[in-house]
């Protein structure tokens, strides 16, 4: 049944979004609009040059800098950043970078309640979600709280032009996976589904051109628009089996976050196919493909992202351990986790084989 005929709840998240080439020039005006004047600018070390440019828009005497953001928001980094907030007497945070810089900005805000302005430079989507993951004592804990939702997002396509093609492709699959799971989320709704379909179509349409011509500003702009929509889906509804599997594989085998999404999402679409036929039709339509899982697999192949868990460094005998963890506290998903079918699916994903629909496997 289509979602239009069902009951649903739709609760949009507040955000002011500025979109377009060169929009980072508006950052000082946005700080003033928030009634602030003493920003702390947060980045990863590699994005230091962007942070220099943003800082140039402010009085150096009232501007703090922190350029040591790191993947997975380690608590010891947050402690140092909080110290920088205090030393700068900051009254707002500006993050420029990917999910790592934005994760640190959210971690600061969680402790300080400061307003934040974020300028994303990848397609991960954290800038429009109320989600924060933090790593303490070797364990990553994720929570949803509106406290960490940025007040202002500035999508300036020029900030994405340097994202290498291979990283662009992997980051896009991270985004697409949010939209795929939003289309069959238990708490999904027609508006989020519209954004999901448009997000997948935009990214899938733009990425081949981004790979061919990384300096094409039009292709990059469409990809960034798609990433915004896909991130909005992640912020709005619950994620399912695919996200559980990616968290297990990332946490247990240290597989790279975005690449794991790229390998797994076509297999999960095939796994869920019979339980979520309307979602699959919409994904296929967005990809202009005969079916969702073939479309996702072919997109990954065309973008030259690794297609197997083996290529990402997962040991073959890790499959059984992964199944054990995946079936504990399973996320809501259209199809129940079936350990035997999951084993067949993960073995195929490990070898990089095409996704196939897997019936329940009988003993
Ligand atoms: P990232 O921020 O770690 O960036 C990856 C690498 O790309 C870094 O080395 C960075 O310096 C570099 N980089 C970033 N932008 C660049 C650019 N424009 N040009 C050249 N290099 C650039 O990675 P990510 O994939 O954006 O984010 C991953 C992290 O974000 C993970 O910790 C993930 O859990 C988290 N995340 C959180 C949410 C959320 O809603 N909370 C959503 C998605 C991802």
Image (tube, rainbow, N blue to C red):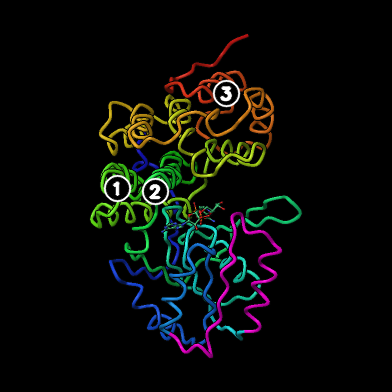
The answer to which of marks 2 and 1 sits earlier in the sequence is 2
Using the image as rendered, state which of residue 100 and residue 144 is in the foreground. Answer: 100
Picture quarter containing residue 153? bottom left
In the image, residue 167 above or below residue 282: below
Q: Which element carries disc 3, helix, strand or loop?
A: helix
What's the mark number on residue 168? Answer: 2
Disc 3 versus disc 1: distance between alpha carbons?
34 Å
Picture quarter containing residue 106? bottom right
What's the residue at 55%, 77% (across, down)? 65
Range drawn in magenta: 58-87
Residue assigned mark 3: 342
Using the image as rendered, state which of residue 228 and residue 338 is in the foreground. Answer: 228
Residue assigned mark 1: 210
In the image, residue 304 above or below residue 36: above
Q: Residues within 10 Å of mark 2 (few under 14, many from 20)?
A: many
**Residue 205 sits inside the magenta stretch:** no
The answer to which of marks 3 and 2 sits earlier in the sequence is 2
Disc 3 versus disc 2: distance between alpha carbons?
29 Å
Instruction: Report x, y in % for residue 256.
Output: 55, 42
In the image, residue 256 above or below residue 106: above
Is the CB atom of the residue marked by disc 3 within 8 angstroms of ligand 1's nearest atom?
no
Using the image as rendered, state which of residue 65 and residue 13 is in the foreground. Answer: 65
Quadrant the C terminus occupies: top right
Residue 42 visible, this angle = yes
Marks 1 and 2: in contact by CB < 8 Å? Answer: yes
Disc 2 versus disc 1: distance between alpha carbons?
8 Å
What's the residue at 56%, 68% (across, down)? 105
Marks 2 and 3: in contact by CB < 8 Å? Answer: no
Instruction: Report x, y in % for residue 283.
Output: 34, 36
């Amino acid at each position: 049944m289509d979602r239009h005929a069902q009951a649903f709840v739709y609760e949009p998240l507040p955000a002011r979004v500025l979109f377009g080439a060169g929009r980072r020039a508006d950052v000082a005006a946005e700080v003033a609009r928030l009634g602030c004047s003493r920003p702390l600018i947060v980045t990863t070390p590699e994005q230091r040059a962007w942070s220099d440019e943003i800082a140039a828009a402010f009085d150096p005497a009232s501007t703090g800098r922190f350029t040591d953001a790191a993947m997975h928001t380690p608590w010891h980094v947050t402690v140092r950043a909080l110290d920088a907030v205090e030393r700068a007497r900051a009254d707002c945070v500006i993050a420029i970078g990917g999910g790592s810089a934005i994760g640190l900005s959210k971690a600061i805000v969680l402790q300080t309640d400061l307003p934040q302005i974020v300028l994303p430079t990848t397609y991960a989507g954290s800038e429009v979600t109320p989600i924060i993951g933090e790593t303490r004592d070797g364990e990553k804990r994720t929570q949803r709280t509106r406290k960490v939702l940025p007040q202002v997002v500035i999508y300036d396509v020029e900030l994405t032009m340097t994202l290498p093609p291979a990283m662009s492709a992997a980051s896009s699959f991270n985004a697409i996976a949010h939209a795929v799971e939003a289309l069959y989320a238990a708490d999904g709704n027609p508006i989020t589904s519209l954004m999901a379909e448009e997000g997948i179509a935009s990214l899938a349409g733009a990425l081949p051109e981004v790979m061919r011509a990384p300096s094409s500003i039009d292709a990059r702009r469409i990809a960034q628009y798609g990433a915004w929509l896909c991130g909005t889906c992640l912020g709005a509804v619950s994620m399912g089996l695919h996200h559980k599997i990616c968290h297990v594989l990332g946490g247990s085998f240290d597989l790279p976050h975005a690449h794991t999404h790229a390998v797994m999402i076509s297999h999960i679409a095939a796994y869920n196919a019979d339980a979520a036929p309307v979602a699959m039709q919409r994904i296929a339509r967005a990809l202009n493909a005969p079916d969702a899982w073939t479309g996702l697999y072919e997109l990954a192949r065309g973008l030259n992202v690794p297609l197997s868990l083996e290529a990402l460094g997962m040991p073959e005998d890790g499959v059984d351990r992964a199944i054990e963890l995946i079936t504990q506290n399973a996320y809501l998903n259209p199809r129940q986790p079936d350990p035997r079918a999951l084993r067949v699916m993960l073995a195929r994903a490990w070898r990089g084989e095409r996704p196939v629909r897997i019936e329940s496997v009988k003993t």
